Image (cartoon, rainbow, N blue to C red):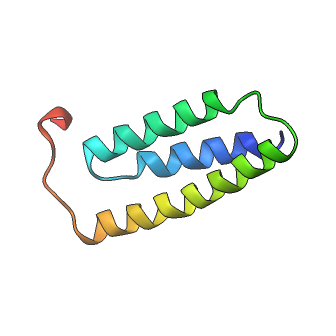
Amino acid sequence: TTTALPLYRSLLREARRVSDYNFRNYAMRRVKVGFVANRDLQGEEASTALSDGMEQLEMLRRQVVLGQLYPSGRSVMET
């Protein structure tokens, strides 16, 4: 649908903002897998999945803020 692509992009954009390497990669992987798994949904199932995606976006935004409040050191994978 027309709202799925902007939601996908927003989720990936927020996932890239997560400061911790492991959480960032987990969030990005989770977004991609979730959209692939739900790509064939239609009707009520699709609208339910989109509303769940919006809730996940808000949760991810809160997680980014928390990560910025309590920063950790860089991972070995990031250096």
Split into 4 quadrants, where in the image is the C terminus?
Answer: top left
**75 vs 32: above or below:** below
**62 vs 78: above or below:** below
Residue at 26% over, 43% down: 21
| View extreme (front): residue | 45
Left or right: residue 52 versus residue 17 is right
Q: Where residue 54 sits in the image (x, y, percent)? A: 65, 57
Split into 4 quadrants, where in the image is the N terminus?
Answer: top right
- Taking depth in this image into account, of 41 and 1 the one nearest to the observer is 41
Q: Where residue 48 sits in the image (x, y, percent)? A: 74, 51
- Taking depth in this image into account, of 19 and 57 the one nearest to the observer is 57
Residue at 62% over, 29% down: 37
Q: How many marks?
A: 0
Q: Where residue 17 sits in the image (x, y, percent)? A: 41, 52
Residue at 28% over, 72% down: 69
* Quarter occupied by residue 32: top right
Left or right: residue 59 versus residue 43 is left
* Quarter occupied by residue 65: bottom left
Left or right: residue 62 versus residue 44 is left
| View extreme (bottom): residue | 69
Q: Where residue 16 sits in the image (x, y, percent)? A: 42, 45
Residue at 13% over, 53% down: 73
- Taking depth in this image into account, of 3 and 44 the one nearest to the observer is 44
| View extreme (right): residue | 43
